[in-house]
Image: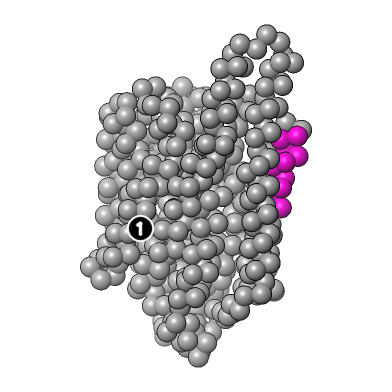
Amino acid sequence: MTNQIQQEKRTPVFTMVICCAFYFILGFITWANGSLIPFAKKAFDLDSDLQAFLVTFASYIAYFFLAIPSSWMLKKIGFHNGLVLSVVVLGVGSLLFIPAAEKSSYILFLTAIFVQGSGMALLQTAVNPYLSIIGPIESAAQRIAIAGFCNKAAGMIAPIVLGSLLLKGANAAEARLAQAASEVEKQTILNELLDQLHVPYIALAIMLALFAIGLKFVSLPEVNMEEEEVSEKVMNPSKKTIFSFPHLFLGSLAIFFCVAVEVMAGDIIGTYARELGTVPQVFRDNATAFTLGFMLVGYLIGIITIPRFISQQAALRVCTSVGILFTLLSVFTTGVISFWFVALLGLANSLLWPAIFPLGIKGLGKFTKTGSAIMIMGIAGGAIWPLVYGYMKDELHIDFQHAFLYAMIPAYSYIVYFAVSGHKVKSRG
């Protein structure tokens, strides 16, 4: 182990603060989708929830296409410059919302979200492995939980802020649209609604620009992951490629389903609440914040208990079991009670990512950067799974609660497999 890494592990406080700041940014932009989905459906006059779920698709599919290129880019320009560039890309994506609003273009709106997703892919590819290696791998879930607390705190703030700025206006516009006497009047109302995007996203772009400038002049040590200490088993000459580590690819699929259930509980809950019908409007507008509030509770539990009282593997098994239970209870109840069980999935989902990620990249040694990128590609689950749910609900006309059940149970079931035995699978080579 290099002296640099040893120093990082002795004094990780400053690095943790920087990483937590990035997780806050990631959380705010990621979980803004919870408000953007219902806003987009109203502002762009979309016909179905399936069309509105393209918001999450545009955000999360960027990880699939950009994770590996992000890994290559980090090797070329370094960890520090990569972080600065990621913030700049996020700022550019934020500014693209302005012409999207001016032109009333849903395609440009989705493009802005995709650009933001590209910046987040670069940021995630850098930050996640860094958090995993600045201390013992056995406590990586605890460190990711601390950063995740900041992520979900920002996620709680985002729907509340955007809900107050966007959704209240959207709710009022919906009533006006119903009374619109002509197509011109209807388009005028929609344009006024889209104009509400200007203030929050110009402000976000300015804050990101200032953060990028400050970050450029912050002293942040580079990490050479290829010099990480590895076990004799990993040093086996037969393990010469990334494909020598099957647990990595099983872990990436676990991340796919992990993000899938997170997005279903966090972003789709507003649509789910509307379908329930009897849920108060304030719950619908701030639905994502309730889910993330329970995720914060879960992170606190993880910070306190891992690895002191429970291993990250055991925590993963417990959380997936609780997720299956809450899913069943949400489907077989109605009204506000069903809503609360969906929100409680935030508690079940809280420790999935912190436990899966370090298990997936454990023992990769010099392949850690590439392995991290492969794990990050799994975030595409957040792009695919809402569309699967929307297709079942809108196109196959399956009851929305049963469609929710059919989407969630297979995802949790695979994570159970990875928690029990998938992370132990090793190459025979």
Q: Check if residue 98 falls in the magenta segment.
A: yes
Q: Main secondary structure of the magenta part?
A: helix
Which picture quadrant has residue 13? bottom left
Q: Position of residue 385 (x, y in %)?
A: 49, 41
**Toward the viewer: 125 or 235?**
125
* Residue 364 in sight here: no
Above or below, comparing residue 219 to residue 354 in the picture: below
In this rendering, position of residue 263 left or right of residue 85: left
| Magenta-colored span | 92-102
Q: Residue at x 51, y 60 (%)?
A: 23
Q: Position of residue 145 (x, y in %)?
A: 39, 62
In this rendering, position of residue 312 left or right of residue 132: left
Which picture quadrant has residue 80? bottom right
Q: Residue at x 67, y 25 (%)?
A: 190
Q: Position of residue 116 (x, y in %)?
A: 64, 51
Mark 1 lies on residue: 299
Q: Residue at x 46, y 44 (%)?
A: 263
Q: Position of residue 105 (x, y in %)?
A: 72, 33
Q: Secondary structure at mark 1?
A: helix
